[in-house]
Image (cartoon, rainbow, N blue to C red):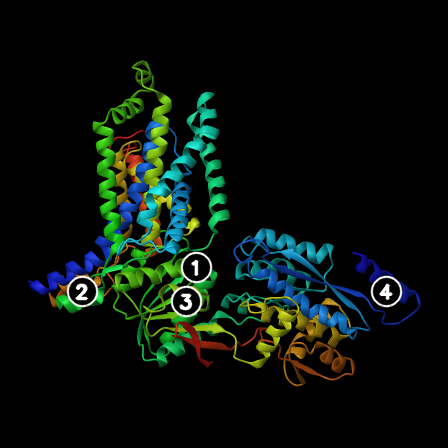
Amino acid sequence: MKKHLLTVALAAALATSGFANAAQTIKIGVILGFTGPIESLTPDMAASAELAFKEASDSGMLLNGSTITPIRADSTCVDASAATAAAERLITADKVAAIMGADCSGVTTAIANSVAIPNGVVMVSPSATTPALSSIEDKGFFFRTAPSDARQGQVLADAVFESGTKIIAVTYTNNDYGKGLSDAFIGAFKALGGKIAIVAAHEDGKGDYSAEVAALAAAGADKLAVLGYLDQGGKGIIQASLDTGAFDSFALGDGMIGQSLIDAFGKDMVDTIATSPGGSSDAMTNFISLAKANKIGGEGPYDGTSYDAGALIVLAIQAGGTADRASIQANMNKVANAPGTKIYPGELKKALEILTAGGEVDYVGATNIEFSDVGEVYGTYRQLEIKDNKFSLVKVR
Amino acid sequence: MPEFIDILNALVLMTNYVILPALTYGSQLALGALGVTLVFGILRFSNFAHGDTMAFGAMVTILITWWFQSLGLSFGPLPTALLALPFGIAVTAVFLLFTDRFVYKHYRGIGAKPITFVMVSVGVMFIMNGLVRFVIGPADQRFADGARFIFKAREFKEYTGLAEGLALRSSQVITIVLAIILVAALFWFLQKTKTGKAMRAFSDNENLALLSGIDPDKIVRITWILAAILATVAGVLYGLDKSFKPFVYFQLLLPIFAAAIVGGLGKPIGAIAGGFIIAFSEVAITYVYKKFLIYLLPENLEPESLMQLLATEYKFAVSFVILVLVLLVRPTGIFKGNVV
């Protein structure tokens, strides 16, 4: 608070002394599920985005020494009405220039449609992956640094088909994520000429999955695609499959990747293919050490995308020369895409200098950012296999 | 006529995917429903905390199992958890008696209505919920050791030469055997012992029982101890067969209550029947019969489609449809229990 007052006082002093472009305090909303199902991931995600803000503020290069004040709000991940109310407060009461968030696909769609887009505020989500968000009427205000699951479905289908599997059974967790990923996977697998033996949804947190596995096993496929969650129904399905001898070969979506799965069943799962977002780039390694130096985990699945979301907003402000909402929107694609000097994590000061001098930047960041024409990253995925009791990289797709 | 080997294959297929899993799940539900029905019959309220009592009992047993494992104790091919089970039951029984002394006793004293008791049990449920998460955390815990399989599907195929495999897990056998022993012991206790008879008398007519000199406090205590035994055994068996996760135990409450009500609340035999009805209907109605029919039907009648009555998404609807039908047609449940 003291610091804030100081900044305001400083800004006031500067303003009265008659500078044309006085330093100011720019507010940016950070709306993530600080309570709810992903509450263990969000603190590091928010800290990663705020690390980008701090980097820009500390550089003294942002709009003549302006600073950024992040304002956190709770998206709850699951409660759309609570999330939209929180976003409404950020936009109307706190008057934020842009929003980094939200996180889960459902609340992100709700906030984008009913608050951010109508008010003309840019939203950059680091983790909403449902394919449905590619086609909302966003008037160019919605961006995401996490790739759509449509892409993941395609990658997983390619990997499975190339491995020689032509017929597969599919089970998905019964929510937006599972349904979206499964539709994408099935569409891509069929397009390649593969056959889907059966599709069965499963509910998370239930007591018994023998019915699902019995149905999946009877349809005549040797491989099972599990598009669910590691510590939820997806695990129950794999356990019941191994127990009854129904399947021992699997294709796994990103929600199933984790050491705990291997610790439990690693030696029984053979010939298993998995995909998870991210490349093998040095940029990610650099980001992780940058995060660790600032006492942030950095290795969470969406920490890198969160930092990138924060950094993109900062650069768009600088490129337009103002923290005006419409100007941020107009400059997002310019700073994210070629041409320009490539910018990696920890190089925001350099980027701000280039932009001040009238140059162009191509922000690459931790997760290889390049926006498509609907404002989302194309996404690179790692194809993994189980080897020596851990997930190991086969190749980057 | 299908060949003999085809009939064998079809039978093995059904046993592996429908009969064995449903028998195991049914036994776990039956033990849970027995606890619910016993508390309902004698203390006259629906105990919503029963699912979390199962979690509590399993948690204590797991902690003791880990301690035993660290000491190097083991039970040979059987899971160490079975050694820890008696201790888990003892701690859970003390905990339930403690809860009764400090919570339920007060409401019995003021003659509260059954619905008040139900709400109180919801409160107890939340406390237990929090306690279990506080002690062991909300995550999955694995504590099974010993031999997981008696024989695996692949071994069965190689041994018999059949096309279909059959896997038999030690946890399935333990579950079914322990459930039979426990149910037999419970019925013997209720039918043959003096205390058991007193409990049934108390359940049938409380005032008459009191007039004939039955000590109500003793009946209440015995009921909680029995509930603790049933809940802990059910919780541990479930955890051994699948895995331990507090949230899942809370979710088990629904099928357990469905089983108890379908069988007839307050009727032990009904709870057992209800458990198996719910488990078998969930698995059998959503099963894909294509492979099964291919084995049995002549070639020209073989089905093209999956031959599935209902998609697995609807498996929870199945138990509730049964519940609604029973309540409509025979509100007392199959074995003429009490009307809720």
Q: Which chain carries label 4?
A: A
Q: How far apart are marks 2 and 1 (CA)?
A: 30 Å
Amino acid bearing label 4: Ala
Secondary structure under badge 4? helix
Q: Mark 1 lies on which chain?
A: A
Q: In which quarter of the image is the N terminus of chain B?
A: bottom left
Visible in this render: residue A120?
yes
Where is residue A79 drawn, in percent x and y?
A: 55, 52
Amino acid bearing label 2: Phe
Residue bearing the label numbered 4: A11
Q: Which chain carries label 2?
A: B
- Nearer to us of marks 4 and 2 is 2
Residue bearing the label numbered 2: B156
First in sequence, mark 4 or 3: give its number. Answer: 4
Q: Is residue B231 left or right of residue A335?
A: left
| Circles 4 and 3 on the same chain | yes
Q: Residue furthest front?
A: B71
Above or below: residue A319 compared with residue B226? below
Q: In this view, does A188 lie to the left or right of A37?
A: left
| Circles 2 and 1 on the same chain | no
Amino acid bearing label 3: Ser
Secondary structure under badge 1? loop
| Circles 4 and 2 on the same chain | no
**Residue closer to the observer: A8 or A22:** A8
- Nearer to us of marks 1 and 3 is 1
Residue bearing the label numbered 3: A182
Amino acid bearing label 1: Asp
Q: Quadrant of the C terminus of chain B?
A: top left
First in sequence, mark 1 or 3: give its number. Answer: 3
